[in-house]
Image (cartoon, rainbow, N blue to C red):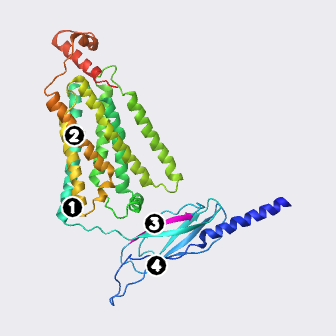
Amino acid sequence: MWRQLWNAVGTSLVLLTVVVVTAAVTPLMTNNVVSGGEDDGTDEEISLTLRPQEVSLQTGEEKTFNLTLRGDLQGQCVNVSFELDGKPVATTPPPMLVCDSPDSYPVVLHTTSYGHATLIVHTDPPTVSVMKKEAITITADVLGWLYTIAWDISFLPQIVRNWRRKSVMGLSLDFITFNVLGFSCYFFFNMGLLWIPSIQDQYFQRHPLTVLHVRLNDVIFALYAVFCVGIQIIQCIFYKRGPKQRVSIPCMIISSLLLLSVVIWLILVPTVDKLLWVDFLYWLSYIKLVITAIKYTPQLYTNYKLRSTDGWSIWQVILDFTGGSLSLLQMFLLAANYDDWKSVLTDPTKLGLGVLSIIFNIFFFIQHYFLYRGASIKIEEKELVKGGGGGGGGEDHDKDKIKFYDNEAATHM
């Protein structure tokens, strides 16, 4: 008897608290969404109404609310997002875009636990971007394709050099490993922001007053980079390299931790309400930024050990430097044309890629043109024997020994 009475009281408490969940849902007036209106100079009032205002639910139930638009948006659209204020008793409905047609939208609320909260509706007015001069925007687009071409071509000299020598000696395998991971992350970041509308909506929800700097050339470049690095990986597998030339343990640890973080994000985004897929894409961009900050270091160290830049194509460095400079110039032109310098910081990956590539390429220039200018790899005879392995004699045999040692010397950390 007492147990039945306790169960009855518990059920009523659940229903009572859930009533409070939606009791505070009230109509929302959207201000300054559209100004102007009728010919007589009066402003038309525009409102969004959410019905019903009161409902009783049990845990695990779903309720569909009706979001109704009253007024004329004059062909414009409004970004609408939702927030649960109070105890998280339900899943937050996803954001939506409200336009003149249709004038009614379903909003689904799924209860997950007991408690009470207030469902709040937020609206963002449509963003209008006004440029100073169209010629500047056209110039920025041209620069975008120019730096894309420069960066795309920059992969070819190293591939051609490896092919001609049938060897990857002097090339850091850590650099290749970091490259394939970094550019894969960069491709998914750009692809999501450019081609997935829901992620674009989430971006403007996070940054409602900024300009999205991702362009088609960014996606094409990232995809092409992954393809070219894949070719270099195949070269590293089949071309001659030293028996000790392999991916270093620090590189494997760093790469594994970064991949593990990606898996963790893939688990967290669907389960944590405040995390959006755009946040996951930004994490991928941060991975690319971290990799760019460290990936050149192994190659710099390899050049230092060999006291030579043989095996490392200087044309790759020149083109990479050109691409980074044009990329930064494009960002600054767009920011100046829209007077939106804050937006430069909303794409830290693109900014960081340009800055870091310029800095590291300057170090490569110093190594190639000043420190080791015209230097070939010089080693002692006993080291030649150690690296050469048997067979033949004379000049050709010495060359084989030198090549074999170069691979061995390129091993680091």
Which image quarter holds the C terminus? Answer: top left
Residue at the image point whose x is 19% and y is 50% from the top: 146
Magenta residues (range): 77-85
For label 1, the SS is: helix
Q: Main secondary structure of the magenta part?
A: strand
The answer to whether the residue labelled 1 contacts the one labelled 3, judged by CB atoms less than 8 Å apart, is no
Estimate the spatial distance between the alpha carbons at disc 1 and disc 3, rounded to whole Å.
30 Å
Residue type (three-letter) at the residue carrying disc 3: Met
Question: For numbered disc 2, what is the local secondary structure?
Answer: loop
Residue 170 visible, this orientation = no
For label 4, the residue is 47
Q: CA distance from mark 2 to mark 3?
A: 42 Å
What is the distance, in whole Å, between disc 2 and disc 4 at their CAs? 54 Å
Instruction: Give the number of the mark in front: 1 or 2.
Output: 1
Say which amino acid is labelled 1.
Thr
Figure disc tally? 4
Magenta segment includes 80: yes
Circle 2 residue: 154
Q: Which residue is mark 1?
A: 137
Q: Residue at x 17, y 10 (%)?
A: 394
Instruction: Give the distance between the C-alpha atoms of the residues marked 1 and 2, in whole angstroms.
Output: 26 Å
Q: Residue at x 48, y 54 (%)?
A: 275
Asked whether 81 falls inside the magenta stretch, the response is yes
Which of pointers 2 and 4 lies earlier in the amino acid sequence?
4
Q: Which residue is mark 3?
A: 96
Left or right of 393, for residue 386 = right
Label located before the other in sequence (1 or 3): 3
